[in-house]
Amino acid sequence: MSVTAARGFAAAGVVAGLKSTGARDVALVVNRGRSKAAAAVFTSNRAKAHPVLWSQQVLSDGVVEAVVLNSGGANCFTGPFGFQTTHATAERAGELLGVGAGDVVVCSTGLIGVGDQVFRDKVLAGTTEAAARLSAEGGEDAARAIMTTDSRPKQAVVTGDGWVVGGMAKGAGMLAPGLATMLVVLTTDADVPAARLDAALRAATARTFDRLDSDGCMSTNDTVVLLASGESGVVPDEGALERAVEQLCADLAEQLQGDAEGASHDIRIEVVRAASEADAVEVGRSVARNNLFKAAVFGNDPNWGRVLAAIGTTTAEFDPYAVDVSMNGVRVCHAGAPDRPSDEVDLTARAVHVLVDLAVGDAEATILTNDLTHDYVHENSAYSS
Amino acid sequence: MSVTAARGFAAAGVVAGLKSTGARDVALVVNRGRSKAAAAVFTSNRAKAHPVLWSQQVLSDGVVEAVVLNSGGANCFTGPFGFQTTHATAERAGELLGVGAGDVVVCSTGLIGVGDQVFRDKVLAGTTEAAARLSAEGGEDAARAIMTTDSRPKQAVVTGDGWVVGGMAKGAGMLAPGLATMLVVLTTDADVPAARLDAALRAATARTFDRLDSDGCMSTNDTVVLLASGESGVVPDEGALERAVEQLCADLAEQLQGDAEGASHDIRIEVVRAASEADAVEVGRSVARNNLFKAAVFGNDPNWGRVLAAIGTTTAEFDPYAVDVSMNGVRVCHAGAPDRPSDEVDLTARAVHVLVDLAVGDAEATILTNDLTHDYVHENSAYSS
């Protein structure tokens, strides 16, 4: 149960032949409820794939009837033919479901540049089959159909007072904010208008997916969409839906982190006593993107010097010689000098906590990242072969 | 011949026991000429090592008598004791050479956090020994003494009309602008005042070392210093010294790229038809810092989609659907769609050329980087062990 946990939704995931493995690769999620309110956020990369360009238009009126998703090809930089494929996919779904194509979101993931006639034929056939297999138990299949290098499907549900919000996500690499390479579909049976969904989703993604920075690489296809069916008949209290959506996004973001390509450590970089939340985010992100630090963590080496070298590149307010750095609870650097011996830090577990105390203010933020491993290099050098 | 190619300079490189391998680890370069004019640029990292903080003060009057350099410890974030070590090193060199400590530049490289009493004792003893071994043939030994993970010393000489400029460099990782992790000492026997040296050095480094971005990681200790002895008695023509210094820096930058830790490809990212040089640099750097693209090159995979995904994150002026991308002479992406088949691109050679045509203006810039390899991860996960 995930995108079909909320009342009013049906989903399916089918095999369309886009993946050479023969695994499921086309998913469909449909809102059959009394409300079709929706909101979405998309990659901030200027190089946007055709499905993103299309879906941004779909969202302009806050109404979404269905979402078609495929793995096995990003349909990005595939020329005018690629855009027509996205349009045709929405048309096909619209015909089958009896709704307008302009209310159908399309999401694609896979290699950039893949989107020829064969791709189109398979996506369209997959859409047809998925429409025939829609069911309130189809969430799991849908979650599997959007996987690329993911080793497992990602799903989560948060239960409210008479309503629920659930969702699925895919993403294992090219995970950097704005957003990570990921497709996320969230559904709720709460009765909420599009504007409130939009505010809740933007606030939640800013603090969750946008703070997951696995490898610093921003994708062209990222889409997070939230659909509300209104089928519970409940209008959640002020803040209740918002908290639930953020909790759901945080859960899915941690699942993405935990399944990042080739990673052997999940690193939480907590920045405290910053002058502003923006400063804390900038500092945390600078550490998350430091290849030398990430390689050191892979080698179980608590190399705090690389943390300081990373944060020194930021514009955040702090004195480099007043910063404290702790790793897994051991303060290894205090006020510009070594503190506890590094060999007191045990980095053998998958979870790593880095605490950076800027000693300036009272703002804080946490960035999630992964280590840089042999397997990351291997998987990403062989991705298209 | 390198730092001692120009008349008026002597150098030495000795074994002080800082490196566990027993290799040379302390170097000294002395200007014995009629002029002591000098200029330098330092890391723009706000987390600056003690030798950088010290040497910035030394350069404030444009006079430098000598440069002491050590590998085997960065003396960075080593507390007040570390700064005293740097000061003591300059004092020791000054005493031995009969010059003021305030005219002695100090450079250190190695692990951050290393700079205890043992380190100090070895650096001081090494300085004493180096002063006793100064010679006009000592350039090679000095170049070897500043190596860390470098596999070979880096030296170069450019000959002018009656004068020369030569130099040495070290650096193999943490190579990113502002500057790369590197120490560079350049010497000339041209008769040039400090202000001209400063202008020449800043212009040259901006177009060479600052466009070498091996791994996106900026160091705490980077120093490039240029000393002029005036011993040729020649004042180079307008532009002649400037061109020679830039040529020398470009040569050394390519040597650094070619010896980058674990790299198997040297990648030149040439950005053309940009609206401005700054745009071209930003676009080139975004590709140079994209781990997914760099891992693809390691795997000899001409994954141009990752180039577009990288440049889409910049603020440079261009239309993502009007960009052309070529790799090793094969145009693989044209105007937002695949062009020649990727399998026409041969990436087996070490040298890789990526051409990004933004189709906007007439500015251009080239960024040098390396691929992301198993060996990079390995070397940097084991660095401190």
Image (cartoon, coloured by chain):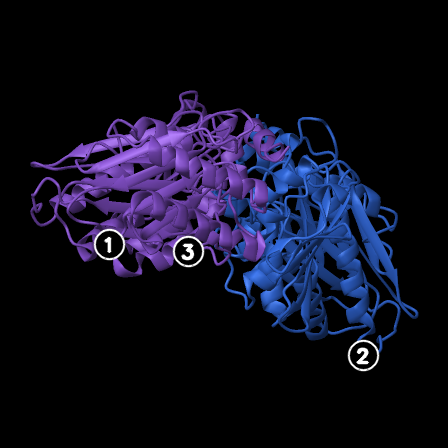
Chain colours: A purple, B blue
Q: Is residue A332 above or below residue B352?
A: above
Image location (x, y in percent) of residue B69: 68, 46
3D distance between C-alphas at marks 1 and 3: 18 Å
Dot 1 amino acid type = Asp
| Secondary structure category for the residue under label 1 | helix
| Viewport quadrant of the C terminus of chain B | top right
Q: Nearer the viewer, mark 1 or mark 3?
A: 3
Q: Nearer the viewer, residue B319 or B25?
A: B319
Q: Residue at x 44, y 35 (%)?
A: A126
Q: Which residue is mark 3?
A: A54
Q: Is residue B325 visible?
A: yes
Q: Quadrant of residue B250?
A: bottom right
Image location (x, y in percent) of residue B37: 72, 68
Q: Are marks 1 and 3 on the same chain?
A: yes
Q: Which residue is mark 1?
A: A198
Q: Nearer the viewer, mark 2 or mark 1?
A: 1
Q: Residue at x 59, y 34 (%)?
A: A383
Q: Could you say which disc has been placed on residue B238 in the image?
A: 2
3D distance between C-alphas at marks 3 and 2: 57 Å
| Secondary structure category for the residue under label 3 | helix
Q: Is residue A338 visible?
A: no
Dot 3 amino acid type = Trp
